[in-house]
C-alpha cells in the first residue's frame, strides 16, 4: 500500500496531540493526552507518554503505512536537529526529539519545527491563507509567536526563527519581556501579561480577592460584560498587535495575516482596536491592502502544519 498519511504531532505545555493527516490536509484520526508536566517529571517519563500516544493512535488506525513524521514543538530548539528545550516544559532541556523519533520510525523523514511556525504553515496550506503567497500566521495565547510565508514558501531564517513577531518592539518604554528586552509585543499582548496588567489596575474576576488564578478567557468575558479595566486590557493588546502587524506589512509586503490562539477567540474586543492601530500605522498603499483575519483551522492548525512539512515539503521544508 502506498504511504499516504503523515503522523503529525503537536507538543505543548498542557497537552500532547497526535493525528494522521492525509495529503489533502484532512485529519483522519487524532488523539491527545495531558502533558506530564508536574514538578519532578523527568525527560524520559515525558518521552514515554508521547511514545505511548503515538503507538495507540497508529494501532487504532490499523497501522497505516506512513509517509513521514511532522512535529510542532515549543522552543527554543536547535534547528533542524531539533534538540528541544521548550520554555514551558522543564523536563526537556536539549532533548534529542528528532533523533528519538527517527529511531522510532527508521527510514521515514522526521521534520520538526517551532509550534507557532507549524500553525502558520497549516493556515497557509489549508486555512485562512490558502491561495495567497505572502502570509504571516500568528498565535496569540500564553505567548505570541508566528511564522512567515513569502512568495509561497516558508521563510526559516538563519536559525529557523524567522517570523517570530512576538519579539518585535511595540513600546520601547513598555514592560520587561521574558526574553530580556522591554516592550516586546509578547510582553504586552500575551494572555498572562494582560491578566497581570489588569490586576495591577484593580481588576478582580468575579470579585475574587487577588485573582491570581485568573485567565485571559475570564478577562475577555468581563470585557464583554462591560468591565472598564478588562476592556482597557483588551484594547491595549489589540493596539500592540496592530502596531506590530503594521511594521510586518511594511517589511514583508503581506497579503494576509491569520491570527489564532486562545486570545484570538475574543473577537471584536481584540480585532477592533487592532484594526484601528493598523490603519493608523500602515500608511503606505501596499501595506493597507493586507487583510487581518482569524485563523480558520482552530485546534488542528498545528497538526495540519506539521503534516505539511512532509506532504508539501517543496514549500515548507528546506533543511536536511
Image: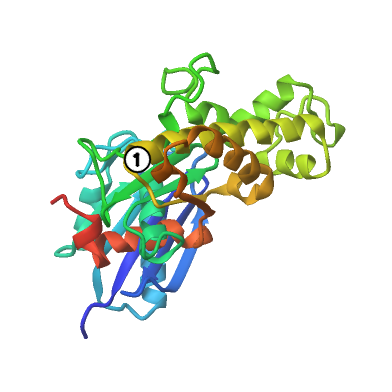
Q: Residue 193's image quarter?
A: top right
**Of 12 and 104, the residue lying toward us:** 12
Q: Is residue 100 left or right of residue 19?
A: left
Identify the secondary structure beneath mark 1.
loop
Q: Is residue 172 above or below residue 252?
A: above
**Of 160 and 294, the residue lying toward us:** 294
Quadrant location of the N terminus?
A: bottom left
Image spot of residue 189 (x, y percent)? 56, 33
Image spot of residue 34 (x, y percent)? 53, 52
Q: Residue at x 52, y 46 (%)?
A: 14
Count up the numbered dots. 1
Residue 86 can be seen in this image: no
Residue 136 can be seen in this image: yes
**Of 292 and 262, the residue lying toward us:** 292
Image spot of residue 248 (x, y percent)? 39, 38
Q: Residues within 10 Å of mark 1 (few under 14, many from 20)?
A: many
Q: Residue at x 56, y 28 (%)?
A: 188
Query: Residue furthest toward the right?
Result: 207
Query: Residue furthest toward the bottom?
Result: 1
Q: Is residue 198 left or right of residue 228?
A: left
Image spot of residue 290 (x, y percent)? 45, 49
Query: Residue furthest toward the front?
Result: 285
Q: Residue at x 58, y 40 (%)?
A: 274
**Of 207 and 270, the residue lying toward us:** 270
Which residue is the site of mark 1?
163
Specify how the rendered protein is coloured.
rainbow
Q: Residue 23's image quarter?
A: bottom left
Amino acid at each position: 500500500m502506498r504511504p499516504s498519511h503523515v503522523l503529525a504531532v503537536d507538543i505543548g505545555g498542557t497537552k500532547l496531540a497526535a493525528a494522521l493527516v492525509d495529503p489533502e490536509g484532512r485529519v483522519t484520526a487524532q488523539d491527545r493526552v495531558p502533558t506530564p508536566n508536574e514538578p519532578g517529571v523527568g525527560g524520559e517519563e515525558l518521552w514515554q507518554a508521547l511514545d505511548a500516544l503515538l503507538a495507540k493512535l497508529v494501532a487504532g488506525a490499523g497501522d497505516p503505512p506512513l509517509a513521514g513524521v511532522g512535529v510542532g514543538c515549543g522552543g527554543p530548539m536547535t534547528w533542524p536537529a531539533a534538540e528541544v528545550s521548550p520554555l514551558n516544559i522543564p523536563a526537556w532541556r536539549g532533548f534529542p526529539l528528532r533523533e528519538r523519533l527517527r529511531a522510532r520510525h527508521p527510514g521515514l523523514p522526521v521534520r520538526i519545527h517551532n509550534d507557532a511556525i507549524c500553525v502558520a504553515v497549516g493556515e497557509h496550506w489549508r486555512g485562512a491563507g490558502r491561495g495567497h503567497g505572502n502570509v504571516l500566521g500568528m498565535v496569540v495565547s500564553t505567548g505570541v509567536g508566528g511564522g512567515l510565508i513569502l512568495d509561497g514558501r516558508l521563510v526559516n531564517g538563519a536559525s529557523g526563527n524567522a517570523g517570530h513577531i512576538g519579539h518585535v518592539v511595540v513600546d520601547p518604554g513598555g514592560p520587561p519581556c521574558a526574553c530580556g528586552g522591554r516592550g516586546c509585543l509578547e510582553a504586552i499582548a500575551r494572555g498572562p501579561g494582560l491578566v497581570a496588567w489588569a490586576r495591577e489596575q484593580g481588576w478582580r474576576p468575579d470579585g475574587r480577592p487577588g485573582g491570581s488564578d485568573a485567565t485571559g478567557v475570564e478577562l475577555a468575558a468581563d470585557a464583554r460584560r462591560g468591565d472598564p479595566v478588562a476592556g482597557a486590557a483588551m484594547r491595549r493588546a489589540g493596539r500592540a498587535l496592530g502596531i506590530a502587524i503594521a511594521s510586518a506589512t511594511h517589511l514583508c509586503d503581506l497579503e494576509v495575516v491569520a491570527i489564532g490562539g486562545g486570545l484570538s477567540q475574543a473577537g471584536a474586543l481584540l480585532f477592533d482596536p487592532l484594526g484601528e492601530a493598523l490603519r493608523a500605522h500602515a500608511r503606505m498603499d501596499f501595506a493597507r491592502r493586507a487583510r487581518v483575519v482569524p485563523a480558520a483551522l482552530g485546534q488542528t492548525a498545528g497538526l495540519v502544519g506539521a503534516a505539511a512539512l512532509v506532504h508539501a515539503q517543496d514549500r515548507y521544508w528546506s533543511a536536511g
